Image (tube, rainbow, N blue to C red):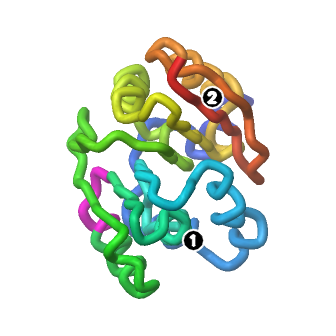
C-alpha cells in the first residue's frame, strides 16, 4: 500500500518543471493559502528576504510588498525560466525594484546577502542533499532570522518531513514552531 501511495502522490526525487508551476498558482489556492497572511508575521519593512525555489512567484509579490521600498526579496531557483517568469510577474505589480533573482547551481545558492527571513515553500522535498541545503540556509540567516519550511502534506510523508527537520537540526537550526498552513507540513526554524 505504501508504494502505491508513493506513486499516486509522486513521492520521489524530482524537480518540478517550470510549466508545472502554473497548476500551483490559481484562484482556488488563494482561498486556502493567503500569501500575505502566511508570511507577514515574519517580514518587516526594510528586511532582506530570500525566497528559495519560488516557482512562478506565488509568494514573491506579497513579500516584495511587505519589505517596502527599503527592503529586498532575493528569489533563488535552479531554473532560469522560473526566474524569468517571476520577474515579469513582479514587474507587472510595479515591484521590480525590490526584487533580485539568482540562478543557483546544483549545490550552491550563489547568494552572499544575510536574510531576516527565508522561505522554502513546497520545494525541500526536491533537494537531493538536504543536510547541505540546511547548512547553506543557516549560513544565509541573520542572528535573529527565521526560516519557514512548508511541504505539501499529500506529497511529503510525515516520516520524510520529520527526517528533513532532523537534518535541519543537524545543520544548526532550531525548531521555533509549526505554523498552520492548509495542505502543508510546516516548521519555523531559527539559528540554534
Q: Secondary structure at mark 2?
A: helix
Q: Residues within 10 Å of mark 2 (few under 14, many from 20)?
A: many
Q: Position of residue 162 (x, y in %)?
A: 65, 22
Q: Does 30 appear above or below 171?
A: below
User: Does residue 128 appear anywhere in the picture?
Assistant: no
Q: Does 62 appear above or below 185?
A: below
Q: Position of 61 compared to 38: left or right?
A: left
Q: Secondary structure at mark 1?
A: loop
Q: Position of residue 48 (x, y in %)?
A: 41, 52
Q: Does 188 appear above or below 183?
A: above
Residue in the picture at 35% in, 56% down: 74
78 in the magenta segment: yes
- Which residues, given as a range, are shown in magenta? 77-83
Quadrant for residue 1, please give it: top right
> Residue 25 got which mark?
1
Quadrant for residue 87, please give it: bottom left
Q: Position of 23 compared to 96: left or right?
A: right
> Residue 159 got which mark?
none
Q: Residues within 10 Å of mark 1 (few under 14, many from 20)?
A: some
Residue in the picture at 38% in, 60% down: 72
Residue in the picture at 67% in, 22% down: 159
Residue in the picture at 61% in, 26% down: 160
Q: Position of 37 compared to 160: left or right?
A: right
Question: Can you name the residue that lies furthest to the top here?
Answer: 170
**Could you give the CA–CA distance between mark 1 and mark 2, rounded to whole angstroms?**
23 Å
- Which residue is tagged 2? 161
Amino acid at each position: 500500500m505504501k508504494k502505491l501511495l508513493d506513486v499516486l502522490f509522486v513521492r520521489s526525487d524530482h524537480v518540478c518543471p517550470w510549466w508545472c508551476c502554473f497548476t500551483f498558482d490559481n484562484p482556488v489556492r488563494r482561498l486556502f493559502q493567503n500569501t500575505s497572511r502566511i508570511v507577514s508575521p515574519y517580514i518587516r519593512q526594510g528586511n532582506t528576504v530570500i525566497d528559495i525555489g519560488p516557482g512562478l512567484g506565488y509568494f514573491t509579490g506579497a513579500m516584495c510588498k511587505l519589505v517596502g521600498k527599503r527592503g529586498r526579496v532575493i528569489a533563488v531557483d535552479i531554473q532560469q525560466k522560473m526566474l524569468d517568469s517571476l520577474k515579469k510577474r513582479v514587474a507587472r505589480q510595479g515591484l521590480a525594484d525590490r526584487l533580485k533573482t539568482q540562478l543557483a547551481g546544483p549545490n550552491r545558492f550563489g547568494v552572499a546577502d544575510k536574510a531576516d527571513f527565508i522561505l522554502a515553500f513546497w520545494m525541500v522535498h526536491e533537494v537531493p542533499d538536504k543536510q547541505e541545503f540546511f547548512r547553506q540556509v543557516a549560513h544565509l540567516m541573520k542572528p535573529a532570522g527565521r526560516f519557514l519550511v512548508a511541504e505539501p502534506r499529500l506529497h511529503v510523508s510525515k516520516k520524510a518531513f520529520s527526517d528533513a527537520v532532523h537534518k535541519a537540526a543537524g545543520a544548526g537550526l532550531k525548531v521555533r514552531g509549526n505554523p498552520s498552513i492548509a495542505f502543508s507540513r510546516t516548521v519555523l526554524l531559527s539559528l540554534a
